[in-house]
């Protein structure tokens, strides 16, 4: 596996300097700058209430962004995540109505997510179909199944213990209790991506499937488990969503897939695969959450809000490209300048 | 472009300066966005008066705009120091919760909300009430446990009956009809549809009318248009469509007016006179119904004021003054009725401007 060393390690600069200038560090810096700015300028922003509302708002995106990061780094995409969450929600409603216990419901919900992910995985890895096409298909398919499962009904009479647990906070800090679970998932994915051979294989896969095969990455198996991962975590997000809003319905979490992909890309993950970190994505999720919450607190219209989020995304993608172009030209000129005296 | 095939080393310098550019640009963006709004917010909260915030089902809906216009007039007349309108761009169940949270934190005294889902907003409204806010539901009710009063346009049954009456009249008392509604979970539409179905099933005058389909345009213009088109293809003998939503009836009217069914298939329901005027004039639509939506917002604002001042608690029998509209009484279950629906046709439509 020593052939797949991430490029950062070969850098000429000292390691600490690289770390300071890396895309991750910049994302974290922007996030901190945004939080400080918001706290200074918005009178009500700096309070435990904000922490609670903001974190509980970002949890679904944060959860799904973790497996999505791995999928995109491996050069694939999963657009069916929100529909999987919706299907899980619908299933929860029907099961609760039929008198199942909460534990059974959660387990069955996770199994449903696992099956959704496995189907995606089989189609992508087993049949070798492009994940974009497959998951656009299952995006519609799973949402359709959700509608079939629960119809036009909404089930809302979930037990208060379950719904209030999901929205409960850790003491006076305002941090939601479920954030602990979300953090565990974030940590698990960070370890898998950055500290295991499986994770290194994903970067290789994103750069080139052929090359990854040559260095011994089991391409099909890797892809299959990636999609199972998104399926299960999406189901988890669906369960959280249902209990948080105490409402199980077929259209829950619709449109969430785009919010997730946007956050992952803003976090510095390359849409072409092969590059990205969990830290960057977590920062991006929190950045979008903070900007949205701060602006909503100031009652900025949602029309403006989606423009801001969109602009952030575009800047994060286009900005580095422009700078790269400028740098390349500058380097080229310097090279020519060095060469020309000897030739003349 | 295949950027991931290129060797990485030559780019390193570029990526760092790029990152710096991104940092500056994003920070500037965030800063300017915050800064530009800071002033506006201070104007609202510094005068120490009561604040009211309206949370409609979604922004940029013509009907909602009229309701909110009335609401802001009402808020001024009732004496609120600040009135705000915030809301989601799409009418999905959970999209209103973040707005309720932000208002809770802003310490708003009165929240006026049209719920997309009666239950999904409840936990958030509970937190708002704990923080001292009064909750007025309008247009579409929340679960009654989660609000102080509900301002209803009209008695739900009256709205249903007038639509059944209109469609029966227009199709000559017999034939197939269909309903094109908003979202499948819309509280108010579903209530009306229930009353319509009940009336069709029990009233002998309507024995020959058969309701063959209920479809949902999700209060989305394009989707409603396509659903109308689909109805005509699926039910060739269809005599009439009832659309109890302003978006649905306008989209359906637009489809019918450009199709072979114009004048053949009757259309009625709840519409805005300004949107429906051309279709009434060109004969696509004979008559439709609605209340004056501005009055809904207006009464909601006054109810909010009375609640915030402690004049009423939302108990049955409470009365409060609703400005120019006179007194209103809180009925059973904390429901306040604004007034009877109006029928619009070619003769009177020019008298209305909303």
Image (tube, grey):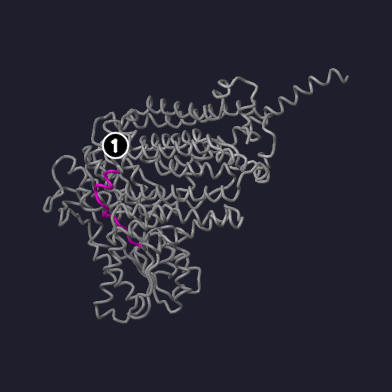
Residue placed most toward the observer, A249 or B186: A249
Query: Which SS class for mark 1?
Result: loop
Residue B81: horizontal and vertical position, in percent?
Answer: 26, 35
Q: Is residue A158 above or below residue A176?
A: below
Residue that extends furthest to the left in the rendered view of this protein: B317
Circle 1 Cα neighbour tier, 10 Å, few/some/many (<14 / 14–19 / ≥20) = many
Residue A302: horizontal and vertical position, in percent?
Answer: 42, 42
Residue that extends furthest to the right in the rendered view of this protein: A344
Whether residue A17 appears in magenta in the rendering, the answer is no
Residue corresponding to mark 1:
A169
Residue placed most toward the observer, B26 or B42: B26
Residue placed most toward the observer, B319 or A328: A328
Image quarter of the C terminus of chain A:
top right
Relative side of A229 to A158, left or right: right
Q: Is residue B325 above or below residue B257?
A: above
Residue A49: horizontal and vertical position, in percent?
Answer: 30, 34
Relative side of A333 to B252, left or right: right
Q: Chain of mark 1?
A: A
Whether residue A156 appears in magenta in the rendering, the answer is yes
In magenta, the rendered stretch is A152-165
> Residue sitting at 24 percent across and 63 percent down?
B156
Image quarter of the N terminus of chain A:
top right
Q: How many marks?
A: 1
Q: Quadrant of residue B205?
A: bottom left
Q: Is residue A191 above or below residue B331?
A: above
Relative side of B326 to B197, left or right: left
């Amino acid at each position: 596996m020593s052939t797949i060393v991430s490029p950062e390690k070969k850098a000429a600069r000292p390691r600490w300097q690289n770390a300071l200038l890396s895309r991750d560090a910049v994302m974290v810096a922007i996030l901190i700058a945004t939080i400080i700015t918001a706290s200074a300028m918005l009178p009500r922003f700096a309070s435990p209430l904000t922490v609670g509302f903001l974190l509980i708002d970002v949890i679904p995106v944060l959860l799904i962004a973790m497996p999505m990061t791995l999928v995109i780094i491996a050069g694939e995409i999963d657009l069916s995540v929100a529909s999987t969450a919706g299907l899980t929600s619908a299933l929860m409603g029907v099961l609760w109505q039929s008198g199942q216990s909460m534990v059974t419901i959660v387990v069955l919900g996770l199994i449903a997510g696992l099956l959704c992910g496995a189907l995606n995985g089989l189609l992508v890895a087993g049949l070798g179909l492009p994940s974009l096409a497959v998951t656009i298909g299952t995006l519609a398919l799973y949402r359709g199944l959700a509608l079939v499962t629960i119809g036009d009904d909404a089930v809302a009479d979930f037990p208060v213990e379950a719904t209030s647990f999901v929205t409960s906070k850790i003491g006076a800090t305002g941090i939601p209790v479920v954030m602990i679970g979300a953090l565990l998932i974030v940590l698990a994915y960070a370890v898998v991506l950055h500290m295991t051979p499986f994770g290194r294989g994903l970067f290789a896969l994103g750069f080139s499937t052929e090359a990854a095969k040559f260095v011994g990455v089991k391409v099909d198996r890797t892809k299959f488990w990636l999609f199972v991962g998104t399926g299960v975590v999406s189901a988890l997000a669906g369960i959280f969503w249902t209990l948080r809003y105490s409402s199980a319905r077929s259209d829950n979490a619709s449109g969430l897939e785009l919010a997730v992909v946007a956050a992952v890309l803003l976090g510095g993950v390359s849409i072409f695969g092969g590059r990205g970190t969990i830290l960057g994505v977590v920062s991006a999720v929190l950045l979008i959450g903070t900007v949205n919450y701060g602006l909503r607190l100031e009652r900025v219209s949602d029309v403006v809000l989606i423009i801001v989020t969109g602009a952030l995304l575009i800047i994060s993608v286009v900005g580095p490209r422009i700078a790269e172009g400028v740098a390349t030209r500058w380097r080229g000129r310097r090279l020519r300048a060095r060469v020309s005296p000897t030739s003349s | 472009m295949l950027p991931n095939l290129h060797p990485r080393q030559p780019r390193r310098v570029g990526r760092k300066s790029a990152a710096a550019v991104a940092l500056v640009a994003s920070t500037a963006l965030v800063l300017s966005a915050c800064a530009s709004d800071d002033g506006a917010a201070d104007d609202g909260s510094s005068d120490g008066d009561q604040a009211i915030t309206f949370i409609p089902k979604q922004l940029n809906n013509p009907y909602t705009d009229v309701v909110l216009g009335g609401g802001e007039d009402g808020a001024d007349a009732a004496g609120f120091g600040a009135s705000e309108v915030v809301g989601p761009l799409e009418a999905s169940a959970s999209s209103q919760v973040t707005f309720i949270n932000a208002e809770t934190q802003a310490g708003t005294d009165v929240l006026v909300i049209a719920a997309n889902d009666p239950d999904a907003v409840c936990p958030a409204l509970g937190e708002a009430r704990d923080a001292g806010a009064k909750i007025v539901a309008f247009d579409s009710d929340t679960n009654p446990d989660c609000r102080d009063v509900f301002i209803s346009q009209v008695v739900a049954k009256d709205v249903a009956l007038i639509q059944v009456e209109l469609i029966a009249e227009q199709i000559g008392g017999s034939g197939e009809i269909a309903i094109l509604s908003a979202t499948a979970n819309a509280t108010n539409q579903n209530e009306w549809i229930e009353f319509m179905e009940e009336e069709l099933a029990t009233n002998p005058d309507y024995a020959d009318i058969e309701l063959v389909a209920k479809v949902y345009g999700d209060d989305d213009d394009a989707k409603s248009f396509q659903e109308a088109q689909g109805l005509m293809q699926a039910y060739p003998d269809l005599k009439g469509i009832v659309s109890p939503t302003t978006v649905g009836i306008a989209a359906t009217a637009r489809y019918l007016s450009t199709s072979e069914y114009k004048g053949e298939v009757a259309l009625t329901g709840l519409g805005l006179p300004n949107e429906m005027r051309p279709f009434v004039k060109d004969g696509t639509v004979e008559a439709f119904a609605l209340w004056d939506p501005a009055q809904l917002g207006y009464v909601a604002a006054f109810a909010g004021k009375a609640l915030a001042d402690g004049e009423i608690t939302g108990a049955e029998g409470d009365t409060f003054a609703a400005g120019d509209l006179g007194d209103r009484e809180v009925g059973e279950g904390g429901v306040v009725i604004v007034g009877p629906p109006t029928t619009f046709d070619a003769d009177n439509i020019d008298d209305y401007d909303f």
